[in-house]
Every structure is written in C-alpha cells, then in structure tokens.
Image (cartoon, rainbow, N blue to C red):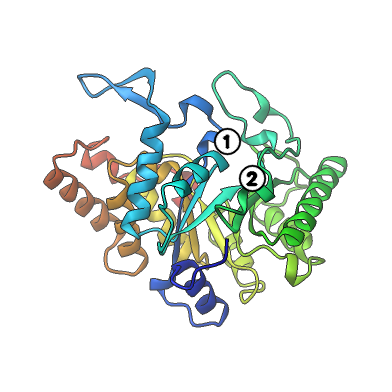
Amino acid sequence: MMTEPNRTLDLKLDRIRGGAYAPADFIIADAKDGDMSMGVATPGFRKGADGALTTVPRPMSDYRDDMRRVTRSGLADIMLMSQSSAEALAAEGLFQDSPVTPAVRLNDASDIWAYRGASYRTVPATPFRTARIDRALPVADLGLYAVTFYNDLAQDAETLDAYAAFRDEASELGMRHFLEVFNPAFDIDTNGMEIGHYISDSIARCLAGVASADYPTFLKIAYNGPRAMEELASYDPGKLIVGILGGGVGTTRDTFELVRQAEKYGARIALFGRKIYFAEDSIEIIAAMRRVVEGQQTTEDAVRDYHDRLAKKGIRPNRSLEDDLDITEAVLK
C-alpha cells in the first residue's frame, strides 16, 4: 500500500519535522487494537435495562462499527487495528480515498496478554509476533511495534534483538513503523531514578544506532509527567517525534488533561484506545480533544460542553458532571 497524498498524518508529520508545528497539526490516533490484548472482552460488556453493565460481552461488530464511525468522521489521523480488523475494513473500501491512515499492530509481546484469568503481566514480557508484515502490507503501510524495558540485562537484550530483527524485515518489505515503549506493569529497580527518566534514556540509547531508513516514524509512550515528557520531546525534535498512549478509561477530565498537558510539554500525537472507545460518544470526545489542544476550551469547559452535547443527543453519561470533572490520574495532578 502506497502512502496517499491526502492523508493528514503525513502532511502533519512533514510540518512537525520541518519545525512548522501548530496545534492544528496535533495528530490523534484511535487505537482499536485491543483484541490483541483483551480477547473476547475487548468490545466491553452489554448494559442491562437499568444501564448497569452485565457480564455478557458485546460482539466484535460493535468494536468495528466504532472504527467505521471514527474513520468516516475524519477526526482521527490514524486508525490502529489488529490484522484481522484491518483486513475486514479494508475489504469494504473504508480507507480508500480516506484522510485516515490505517495501521496494524505488528507484535504482541506477552505483557499485553491481559485477558480474563491471565497473569502474564506479573512477569517480564516475552517477545512474540502473531501478525506477518507481508500479510499486513496489502492493507496498511504503517505498523506498531512495542517494547518494554526492565533494567534487566538478559531480558532487555532479548527485547532489543527481537526489535532489530523486526526492523530488518520491515525495511526489506517496505513497512514503516512506530515504536511503543511501555512502562513496566510492575515496579522495577531503577537505582533511585524516576521511571520517566529511565524510559527516556532507554529510548534514546535504543535508537542512537538505528539508521534513518529503519527509524520509527514516531513514538508512543506513557505520560510520566512534565519533566520526562519535555526532556524527551526536546532531545531530537526533528527526528524523534513523541506521542502518548491513553492508558485506562479515567474520567472525561482525565482525557482532556492528559492531551493538554502532554501537548504543552512537547508531545505531538495522542494514541488513545479505551479513552475513546469507552467514552459515551467517540466522535464527540475526539472533537473535544482537538478543541482543548487548539486552545478553544479549557479542560473544565470542555467537560461541561461535552455533557451538554451528550444531553442534546439523548445520550446518558457514564458519570455525573461533578464526578466527570474530577482529575483522578495521579500523574496529571
């Protein structure tokens, strides 16, 4: 698949790399690759007559319907999917002449195996790949590769070897990629250094020997606070473009605060999964994220406006306005 000239991702990346970034160039990805992690529970659970969640999972068609809605809205720049979803939607022609870039998750190390009853995230990740690059290329020329560093020599060397093998194959086949670097799912010993600075140094060291032809298009990392974000984003800004992952669902205020703070301290991309899908309205939440980033609304005003828009659509909010105005994620306080 060749990069299409009308796709907003590439136009925005060109401006970011050229030093001409403006808030309107902020990139938003809808990360709907959760089936590579959560299995059957990925689309969430059905609601009962009282609005409470049941234990009955929703079908995969609900998850893909939301991919269709977001893609057709043109509000997101990237739609990240599993290979199976990408094939299904590409076969419908969803991405033909679309400004949205399709992307595929190209590895699924064991630290994302988070389905019901699983305990894989309690131990360091084992490198693993299900998706094949040659099978992904007919539907997407952009893929995600994820790593986690544990400050363990043997473990991290195995992770880096697997990433090097992936880069070689991706370059040979013509697949560009972006690199996701997770925080470990459990506490690790970083010799008194804050985890955000350990992650930043791990990334810079990991990529220092990588040639431009094999370099990731951008990063996807956890937001570890202003200092860690600012130092990494300013390290090599013309080359190393930093994006943030969304993490848990949180409140609507959490969503807006995360994107506002991250952009303020140098992030140029938000790659949100649950924060978009489990919002009451995916289209409204993305549109509000853009208004916040572009300075049209404060995060508090954006929450109030979001609730007003839900009410006009007859959509019942997941939380009261008062609860939804709370900032609950510690790193954002």
Q: Residue furthest right?
A: 154
Residue lying at 75% horizontally and 41% vertically, measured from the top left: 189
Residue occupied by mark 2: 183
What residue is at 20 percent from the left and 54 percent from the top? 305
Q: Residue at x 64, y 69 (%)?
A: 240
Please count the marks in the image. Answer: 2
Q: Secondary structure at mark 2?
A: loop
Q: Quadrant of the N terminus?
A: bottom right
The quadrant holding residue 148 is: top right
Q: Which mark is residue 235?
A: none
Front label number (1 vs 2): 1
Rate crowding at label 2 as few (under 14), some (14 to 19) or many (20 or more) other CA atoms within 10 Å.
many
Relative depth, front residue between 209 and 106: 106
Mark found first going from the N terminus, 1 or 2: 1
Quadrant hosting residue 228? bottom right
Kind of residue sitting beneath label 2: Asn
Q: Secondary structure at mark 1?
A: helix
Is residue 121 at all visible to an observer of this figure? Answer: yes
**119 over 244 or under it: above or below:** above
Which of 81/138 is in front? Answer: 138
Disc 1 and disc 2: Cα gap in Å? 18 Å
Residue 25: image x %, image y %? Answer: 43, 72
Question: What is the three-letter code of the residue carrying label 1?
Answer: Met
User: Which residue in the protein does label 1 denote?
Assistant: 36
